[in-house]
Image: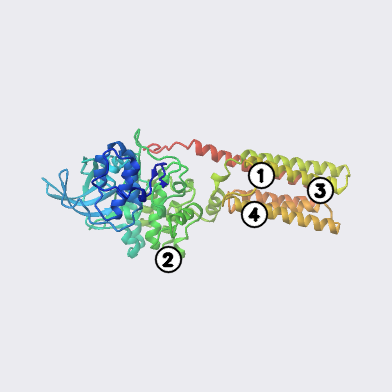
C-alpha cells in the first residue's frame, strides 16, 4: 500500500488480481478502480481514463489527480496522437507539433476558411484541474488582447468535449533555440533580434501582462527571420481573479528565470522578464544558457547563488558594450537592472546606432556598489534582527565592564577573562533561544557564517592564551580582536550580505586607532560591535518588511 501527495491510499495490485474489465463493480471503491487501471496497463490492455471517469463519477476528483500523476510519472516515449484526423470544433487535426507542460500544439486545418493553423489544447484534457484550466484560459484571453507584430495572435478560443483550446497562425519556421545552438548570428544581428523581442515584451507589460517564461524555445522565427513571441501559459495578467501564483511556487524555465522567481518567495514583476531577456541575450552571445547544471536542482542553485560567467570569458570577440547590456539586464538584484523593458530596448537601439549606452557607465565603482548590495541568503537571516541587537548589547556592555574593572586596577582574570566567559555564555544562550533550542547550523546559508565566527573565536582564544603566557599587555589583545573582527565581517560579506564588508573596514580602522589609544580600546571595540550588529539587524528587518509588503509597481500596467 502507498499514498499519493493528497493522502489517498493506493492498494497493492496483488490484492486486486481478481478484477477484470468485465467484473469491476459499478460502485467499486476508489482503491479498486485505481488498482484495476494499473493492472490493465501492466497487462498491455487498453485503459482509457475517460471511460473510468464516465463510469465512476463519484470518484471523479480523486481519479483525475491519480491519472494526472500516473501520466507525469510515465517516462515512455509518446505515441502518435490519437486526435489525428479528428474534428475539434471547426478544426481537423493533422499532426502533433509540440508538447509542453500546459498544452499540446497540433497542426490543423480550419474548415470553411480552408487555412492551416496551429491548434493548442490543454494537455491533460478532461483530467485538467480548475487551476490548469484557468491558466490555459488566461493564456488564451491575455494573448488575444495583444496586437503586436512580434506576438503571435489568437484566432479563436473555445472548448470541445471538455477540452479547452485556442487557434493561432501556423508559423512554418524554427525557434530561437536553433540560433543559440548554431551560433550563426553576428553581434549586431543578435542585438536587433533581442530588440524586437524586448519591444514585444515592453508592449505586453504596458498591457498589464508579465510573461514569466521567456526562453528561446518560446520564441518562433518565421521565414523572414523575424522573432515571434508565444506561450503565455505562465503569464500574469492585471485583471481581478487572474493571479494564480501561490507563495513558494517556482514557475518558469530554470535556465532563464530570475533569482527572485527561482526562490519562489517574491511575486514576479516586470523585472523578472527583463532578467530573462538578458539571459536570452546571453545564450545568443555564448551559445549556452547563463546557468548550467545537470538537473533542475543544480540550475536553481546556480540561479540563486552564482553570477554568470562573463560572456567575453567564453567568446572573446563579443562586443564589450553588448556584454554590459546583457549583464545589466541580468543583475542579481532587481534594482540594478533596467527599470523597464523599454529602457532595455532603448539601450539596444543605442548600441545598434553606435551611441553610448546606459550600461557602458557600469564601471568598477558600479560593480562594487552592486556587490555591496548583494544579499544572497536574506531569507535565512531576516528573523535574526532582535537576536543580533541582543548580542550587540551583550558585547558592548561586556567591554564596558572590562574597561571599568581594569580602570579600578583589578587582576587580569577578573578584568578580562571572567567578563569574556560570561559574555560568551550569554551569546550562546541568545543563539539557542532564538533558534528554538538549537545551537548548530541547519542550512547551507548558516554554515559559512558559523565557520567564520568559530574560527574567529578559536584564533582569538589562542592569541590571548599566548599573550598571557608571554606576559603581553592585555590591551594589545583588543587591537588584535578588532583586526580579526574586521576580517570576519569582510569574509562574511562574500557569503551573506555584501554590505558587511563596510563593517569589516570599520573594525580595521578601530584596530589602528586602538593601537594609539590602548586604554580606550575595549570601549571602541564594544561600541563598534554594537553599531555593526544593530545596523545588520536593521538591514534584515527592512528586508523582512519588504517581503511582506512588496512595493507597488508604478508602470502603466500596474503591479500584477
The kind of secondary structure element at disc 2 is: loop
Left or right, 308 with reference to 133:
right
Please give the residue where the numbered disc 2 appears in the rendered image.
Answer: 315
Which residue is at a point 88% across and 42% down the rendered structure image? Answer: 408
Instruction: Give the Cα distance between marks 1 and 4.
Output: 19 Å
User: Does residue 249 appear anywhere in the picture?
Assistant: yes
Asked whether disc 2 touches disc 3, contact meaning CB atoms under 8 Å apart, the reply is no
- Give the answer, above or below, for where 433 lies relative to 465: above
**Which numbered mark, 2 or 1, is in the foreground of this view?**
1
Q: Nearer the viewer, residue 510 or 465?
A: 465
Lower sequence index among marks 2 and 4: 2
Left or right, 246 with reference to 416:
left
Please give the residue where the numbered disc 4 appears in the rendered image.
Answer: 451
Asked whether disc 3 touches disc 1, contact meaning CB atoms under 8 Å apart, the reply is no
Left or right, 120 with reference to 253:
left
Lower sequence index among marks 2 and 3: 2
Left or right, 214 with reference to 433:
left
Q: Nearer the viewer, residue 236 or 88?
A: 88
Please give the residue where the numbered disc 1 appears in the rendered image.
Answer: 532
Please give the residue where the numbered disc 3 appears in the rendered image.
Answer: 417
**Looking at the picture, how far across and down is residue 308, in whole percent?**
47, 58
User: Does residue 147 appear anywhere in the picture?
Assistant: no
**Which numbered mark, 2 or 4, is in the foreground of this view?**
4
The residue furthest bottom is: 316
Lower sequence index among marks 1 and 4: 4
Lower sequence index among marks 3 and 1: 3
Amino acid at each position: 500500500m502507498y499514498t499519493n501527495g493528497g493522502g489517498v491510499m493506493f492498494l497493492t495490485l496483488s490484492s486486486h488480481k481478481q478484477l477484470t474489465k468485465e467484473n469491476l463493480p459499478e460502485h467499486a471503491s476508489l482503491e479498486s478502480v485505481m488498482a484495476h487501471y494499473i493492472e490493465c496497463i501492466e497487462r498491455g490492455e487498453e485503459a482509457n481514463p475517460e471511460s473510468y471517469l464516465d463510469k465512476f463519477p463519484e470518484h471523479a476528483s480523486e481519479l483525475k489527480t491519480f491519472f494526472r500523476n500516473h501520466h507525469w510519472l510515465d517516462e515512455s516515449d509518446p505515441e502518435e496522437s490519437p486526435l489525428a484526423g479528428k474534428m475539434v470544433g471547426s478544426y481537423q487535426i493533422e499532426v502533433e507539433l509540440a508538447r509542453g507542460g500546459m498544452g499540446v500544439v497540433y497542426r490543423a486545418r480550419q474548415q470553411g476558411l480552408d487555412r492551416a493553423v496551429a491548434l493548442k489544447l490543454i494537455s491533460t484534457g478532461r483530467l485538467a484541474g480548475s487551476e490548469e484550466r484557468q491558466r490555459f484560459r488566461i493564456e488564451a484571453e491575455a494573448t488575444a488582447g495583444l496586437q503586436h507584430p512580434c506576438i503571435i495572435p489568437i484566432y479563436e478560443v473555445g472548448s470541445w468535449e471538455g477540452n479547452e483550446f485556442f487557434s493561432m497562425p501556423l508559423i512554418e519556421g524554427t525557434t530561437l533555440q536553433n540560433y543559440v545552438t548554431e551560433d550563426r548570428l553576428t553581434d549586431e544581428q543578435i542585438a536587433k533580434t533581442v530588440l524586437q523581442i524586448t519591444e514585444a515584451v515592453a508592449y505586453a507589460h504596458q498591457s498589464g501582462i508579465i510573461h514569466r517564461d521567456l526562453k528561446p524555445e518560446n520564441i518562433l522565427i518565421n521565414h523572414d527571420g523575424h522573432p515571434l513571441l508565444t506561450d503565455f501559459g505562465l503569464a500574469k495578467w492585471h485583471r481581478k481573479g487572474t493571479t494564480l501564483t501561490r507563495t513558494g511556487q517556482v514557475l518558469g524555465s530554470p535556465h532563464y528565470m530570475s533569482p527572485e522567481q527561482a526562490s519562489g518567495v517574491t511575486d514576479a514583476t516586470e523585472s523578472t522578464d527583463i532578467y530573462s531577456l538578458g539571459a536570452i541575450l546571453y545564450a545568443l552571445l555564448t551559445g549556452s544558457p547563463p546557468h548550467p547544471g545537470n538537473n533542475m536542482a543544480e540550475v536553481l542553485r546556480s540561479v540563486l547563488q552564482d553570477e554568470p560567467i562573463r560572456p567575453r570569458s567564453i567568446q572573446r570577440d563579443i562586443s564589450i558594450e553588448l556584454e554590459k547590456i546583457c549583464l545589466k539586464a541580468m543583475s542579481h538584484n532587481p534594482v540594478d537592472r533596467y527599470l523597464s523593458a523599454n529602457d532595455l530596448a532603448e539601450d539596444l537601439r543605442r548600441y545598434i546606432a553606435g551611441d553610448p549606452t546606459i550600461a557602458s557607465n557600469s564601471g568598477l565603482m558600479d560593480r562594487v556598489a552592486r556587490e555591496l548590495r548583494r544579499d544572497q541568503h536574506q531569507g535565512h537571516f531576516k528573523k535574526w534582527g532582535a537576536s543580533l541587537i541582543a548580542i550587540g548589547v551583550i558585547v558592548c556592555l561586556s567591554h564596558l565592564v572590562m574597561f571599568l574593572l581594569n580602570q579600578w586596577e583589578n587582576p587580569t582574570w577578573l578584568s578580562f577573562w571572567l567578563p569574556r566567559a560570561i559574555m560568551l555564555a550569554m551569546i550562546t544562550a541568545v543563539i539557542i533561544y532564538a533558534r528554538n533550542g538549537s545551537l548548530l547550523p541547519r542550512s547551507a546559508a548558516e554554515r559559512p557564517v558559523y565557520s567564520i565566527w568559530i574560527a574567529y573565536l578559536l584564533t582569538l582564544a589562542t592569541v590571548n592564551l599566548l599573550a598571557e603566557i608571554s606576559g603581553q599587555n592585555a590591551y594589545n589583545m583588543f587591537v588584535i580582536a578588532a583586526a580579526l573582527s574586521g576580517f570576519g565581517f569582510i569574509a562574511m560579506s562574500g557569503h551573506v550580505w555584501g554590505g558587511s564588508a563596510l563593517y569589516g573596514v570599520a573594525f580595521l580602522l578601530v584596530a589602528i586607532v586602538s593601537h594609539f589609544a590602548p586604554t580606550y580600546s575595549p570601549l571602541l571595540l564594544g561600541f563598534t560591535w554594537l553599531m555593526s550588529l544593530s545596523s545588520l539587524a536593521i538591514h534584515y528587518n527592512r528586508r523582512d518588511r519588504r517581503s511582506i509588503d512588496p512595493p507597488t509597481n508604478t508602470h502603466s500596467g500596474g503591479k500584477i
